[in-house]
Image (tube, rainbow, N blue to C red):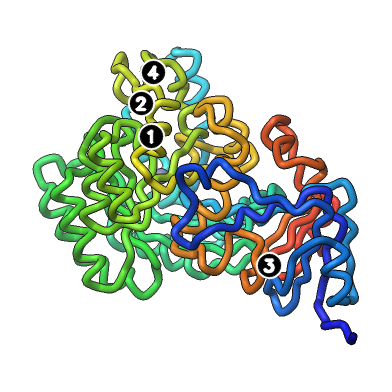
């Protein structure tokens, strides 16, 4: 029998972890399962996965000019990272040292964001893009192949549209999904003019709708109210945009309920979301995305913590919050929330390590939440997030044999080879030229 031609074969994987499941995502018992093909192989062509199975099965039907031997190695889908603030100017490392050593009073949330806003304004388009491309390289080296990227560090209409144009123009092996974030925090001087600010946000949506897949709004006691978020979210939906939310990070602002009312694709943070909010999200099909890097970086592991935006406040115990969401039937994902203030890591491997240690999640849960469910949070689970025939060929070959080892070891990059859209972009841990 003549063999079919592929562009690339990966053969003899010690573990081929597919993360496959229904396009609506994995929850309940299915979230706790791994689908592993021992001695697995994948055939790739035209940027797509053509076939998978045991090495013997795939070798019988497929040949290719490039064959990667994955003997003794784990092969998985590339990570989908569904929450980042990719474009910003400056760094916040000095503020961070003052915070952890408690040498200076903690900046209010909006104070920190305002600092980044002023630095972003002072940074040229070319410099912002150069930094973003370098960060995308780092993400790719760590196994991320799809990234959501938000605006949000301008806080005015023209500035946010500038960041959106730059984000939408990025061309990189990591596929960037642009999100317009017109309601991040209220800028200085608007305390008595909230309605004026919301009106301007609504007015900016028309121009944003051609460039952004999503409109994001922050439903939080320190940011915007349920009603304000519904007004902007519904205006975005009327223009054909999908909606996502920052919800309930610093307190219960009914963010989970707002997400459900807007049929949002995702709602993220959720530290204070109620059971009622999680049930509404489950019914609306809104993905809950948890951000353990933020929990670590803001030193929020203990129930009572100092130096936060709500100093002395009782912080919910996050392993319980995540469990409550899963028990309510929500599809849950994980993300970096890469940004200079609350989570400067671009690495989904780090997020996995933290999800086990800070949220007490199991290996299967974590892998499914960083792949298929994360793709679902970006409405892309029909196209990527798992190793299935017909899907985009985004694959990682790891320097370890077992999926649990990627989470058990931490602090080192374990990705050896990264294939994005069918092309080898990283080999032996280095960017392919
Ligand atoms: Zn964010």
Vertical placement of 396 versus 405: above or below?
below
Q: CA distance from mark 1 to mark 4?
A: 13 Å
User: Residue 307's quadrant in the figure?
Assistant: top left
Is label 2 in contact with label 4 (beta carbons under 8 Å)? no
Residue 307, numbered label: 4
Mark 4 / mark 3, whichever is N-terminal = 4
195 relative position to 392: left or right: left
Q: Which mark is residue 112?
A: 1
Nearer-N-terminus badge (1/4): 1
Do tag 2 and tag 1 residues touch (Cβ < 8 Å)?
yes
Tell whether 175 sits left or right of 268. Answer: right
CA gap, disc 2 and disc 4: 8 Å
Q: Residues within 10 Å of mark 1 (few under 14, many from 20)?
A: some
- Residue position marked by numbered label 3 in the rendering: 393
* CB atoms of marks 4 and 3 within 8 Å: no
Residue 303 spot, x, y in % from top left: 38, 16
Side (left or right) of 23 relative to 113: right
Asked whether mark 4 and ligand 1 are closer than 8 Å, the reply comes as: no
Circle on res. 107: 2
Residue 325: x and y in percent read 37, 38
């Amino acid at each position: 029998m003549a063999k079919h031609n592929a562009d690339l074969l990966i053969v003899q994987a010690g573990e081929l972890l597919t993360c496959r499941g229904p396009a609506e995502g994995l929850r309940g018992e299915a979230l706790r399962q791994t689908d592993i093909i021992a001695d697995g192989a994948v055939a790739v062509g035209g940027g797509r996965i053509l076939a998978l199975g045991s090495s013997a099965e795939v070798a019988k039907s497929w040949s290719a000019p490039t064959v990667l031997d994955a003997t003794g190695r784990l092969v998985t889908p590339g990570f989908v990272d569904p929450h980042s603030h990719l474009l910003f100017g400056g760094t916040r490392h000095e503020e961070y040292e003052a915070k952890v050593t408690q040498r200076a009073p903690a900046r209010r949330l909006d104070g920190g964001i305002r600092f980044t806003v002023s630095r972003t304004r002072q940074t040229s388009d070319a410099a912002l893009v150069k930094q973003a491309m370098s960060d995308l390289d780092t993400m790719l080296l760590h196994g991320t192949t799809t990234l959501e990227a938000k605006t949000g560090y301008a806080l005015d209409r023209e500035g946010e549209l500038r960041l959106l144009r730059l984000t939408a123009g990025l061309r990189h092996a990591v596929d960037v999904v642009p999100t317009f974030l017109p309601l991040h925090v209220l800028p200085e001087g608007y305390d008595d003019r909230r309605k004026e600010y919301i009106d301007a946000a609504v007015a900016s949506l028309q121009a944003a709708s051609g460039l952004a897949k999503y409109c994001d709004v922050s439903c939080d006691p320190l940011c915007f109210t349920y009603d304000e978020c519904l007004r902007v979210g519904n205006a975005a939906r009327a223009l054909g945009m999908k909606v996502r939310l920052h919800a309930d990070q610093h307190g219960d602002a009914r963010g989970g309920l707002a997400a459900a009312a807007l049929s949002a694709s995702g709602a993220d943070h959720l530290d204070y979301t109620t059971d009622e909010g999680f049930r509404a999200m489950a019914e609306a099909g809104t993905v809950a995305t948890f951000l353990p890097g933020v929990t670590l970086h803001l030193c929020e592991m203990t129930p009572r913590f100092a130096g936060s935006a709500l100093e002395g406040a009782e912080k919910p115990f996050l392993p319980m919050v995540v469990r409550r969401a899963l028990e309510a039937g929500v599809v849950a994902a994980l993300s970096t929330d890469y940004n200079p203030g609350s989570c400067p890591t671009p690495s989904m491997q780090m997020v996995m390590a933290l999800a086990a240690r800070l949220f007490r999640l199991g290996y299967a849960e974590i892998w499914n939440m960083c792949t298929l469910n994360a793709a679902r949070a970006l409405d892309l689970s029909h196209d990527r997030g798992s190793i299935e025939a017909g899907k985009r060929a985004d694959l990682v070959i790891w320097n370890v044999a077992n999926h649990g080892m990627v989470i058990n070891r931490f602090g080192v990059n374990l990705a050896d080879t990264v294939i994005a859209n069918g092309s080898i972009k990283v080999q032996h841990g280095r960017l392919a030229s």
